[in-house]
Image: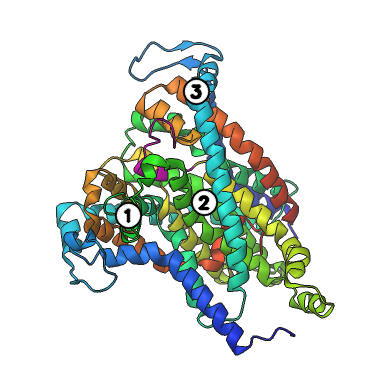
Amino acid sequence: MARRATGTRKLVVTALAWAVGLAIFFPILWTILTSFKTEAEAIASPPSLFAFRWTLENYVEVNSRSDYFLHFMNSVVISLGSTLLGLLIAIPAAWSMAFVPAKRTKDILMWMLSTKMLPPVGVLVPIYLMFRDFGLLDTRIGLIVVLTLINLPIIVWMLFTYFKEIPGEILEAARMDGASLWDEVVYVLTPMAVPGIASTLLLNIILAWNEAFWTLNLTAAKAAPLTAFIASYSSPEGLFYAKLSAASTLAIAPILILGWFSQKQLVRGLTFGAVK
Amino acid sequence: MATAHSRAAARVMISPAVILLLGWMIVPLSMTVYFSFLSYNLLMPGMEEFIGFGNYEFFLTDPAFMEALVNTLLLVGGVLVITIVGGVGLALLLDQPMWGQGIVRVLVIAPFFVMPTVSALVWKNMFMNPVNGLFAHMAKALGLPPFDFLAHAPLASIIVIVAWQWLPFATLILLTALQSLDKEQIEAAEMDGASAFDRFRFIVLPHMSRAITVVILIQTIFLLSVFAEILVTTNGGPGYASTNITYLVYAQSLLQFDVGGGSAGGIVAVILANIVAIFLMRMIGKNLEA
């Protein structure tokens, strides 16, 4: 390569990339730092980056003054519940489309994807009214159902692209050895499919955790996950920066960590295999 | 390899997903269509009557609709420009050899994992607030008057917030595309005396064009439905200055309880999204070997 990564060049690139990276990350860093300040220091001018008295009082306050733990658990139950339910429905569907393709498989896949293109606001009114009439407003189960349905196309697609990579010959070999369909699924397919299923699980927990249309519109207090709970800080109470920061840090930390593990799956899951 | 037996099994396995999605799509959507032809206000139950295209006429001629439509286009367009230009630049930068590449990548991608209500509130309060925000502190340090971003440039501020959330997505996908580029091609061009700009213009950019198209289409689908960021920052205001179609339909149906008008707006939003979706589906369909 003519343009070798010489020392100087690499140094310049490194400095530039770190500067840009830190600038993009800064709002998150600033939130985390502010969560450890007192309210007075949080709005002090000029603000200080690290030189303040570190305190955990905001985390204690956030938990004691509001039902933070309840909303955190709502987020956990709703994102995990909708993802597991989605996998339960999607795994058989993706399996059959990947290994027993029919003439219409492609059409079905494309149609499933098209349901994801439907803007939520197009069905907001009927869903809201149905939820009201069936007593599902502000319930965890109602949100689990809706989030399962909106993410189901993504789950099916991701699983399909993963299952497609499992060589069909292995299944045929198993069948020749007399394996039943059930044996095939349990002993041959499942072990090979676990990594793909795990990635799908991860990405969908993230998507469900951060979903902020249906969670805001269909919950009030009881079943509100963190997205909706944090939105309540948009009232003047939000002026308590340190507490807002503590609540925010707690809300995003689990997903930031999960997210770092799932960068690759993100590309795959959100582009529906159009970029590899 | 597929036997009649396995075909039947396959049909059974696929049907729950198909039936659920079919129900999810057809039932509420046809209800929306039905409501859109009714005069139906939740505050006046039992007064529903068929009024044909009256709701559409009302919604489409409402000055708020034109403003919301323009805002929607500005929001989508603005975010796309920032994320595509920024994303290409960042992808080119991150593709270079450097120290700590993994960490930088994580830093750049992080905003994508922040829930929309958190990022909107953090930007609104801790950065854009005219008294206590960081930008106000910076303006003060420079001797400038503080600027109330969300009051005087609400849409531009929301564009910045949403672009910050989506820049990682564009970067990640464009970087993935860039990494599949044959580096020998670049070296050959370099030896033939092509300048850095020419290499970018004639080799790198054409290679990334497909990924760029995909990013544009996918982001457009999501950006047409931006909601939480508007709800927690400006509530669509001042006036309708930061109301997009999604927020307008929400306000019409759940704040003014006008189910008929809101439904007509919802159908308009569906049609808008479909125009984009058709192109996206065609691109994905070409790539699918099923």
Q: Whole-Å distance between the Cαs marked 1 and 2? A: 51 Å
Contact (CB < 8 A) between labels 1 and 3?
A: no
Residue B238 colored magenta?
Answer: yes
Mark closer to the chain start, 1 or 3: 3
Q: Secondary structure at mark 1?
A: helix
- Label 1 Cα neighbours within 10 Å, binned few <14 / some 14-19 / many ≥20: many
What residue type is disc 3 on? Answer: Pro
Q: Is-magenta flag for residue A109?
A: no
Which residue appears at 54% of the width and 70% of the height? Answer: A195
Q: Point out the stretch of residues depicted in magenta.
A: B226-242
Which residue in the structure is indicated by mark 3?
Answer: B63
Cα–Cα span, label 1 and label 3: 34 Å
* Residue sitting at x 45%, y 31%: B248
Say if mark 1 contacts mark 2, CB within 8 Å: no
> Closer to the camera, A215 or B4?
A215
Residue beneath label 2, please? Answer: A89
Q: Residues within 10 Å of mark 2 (few under 14, many from 20)?
A: many
Chain bearing tag 3 is B
- Left or right: B187 with respect to A257? right
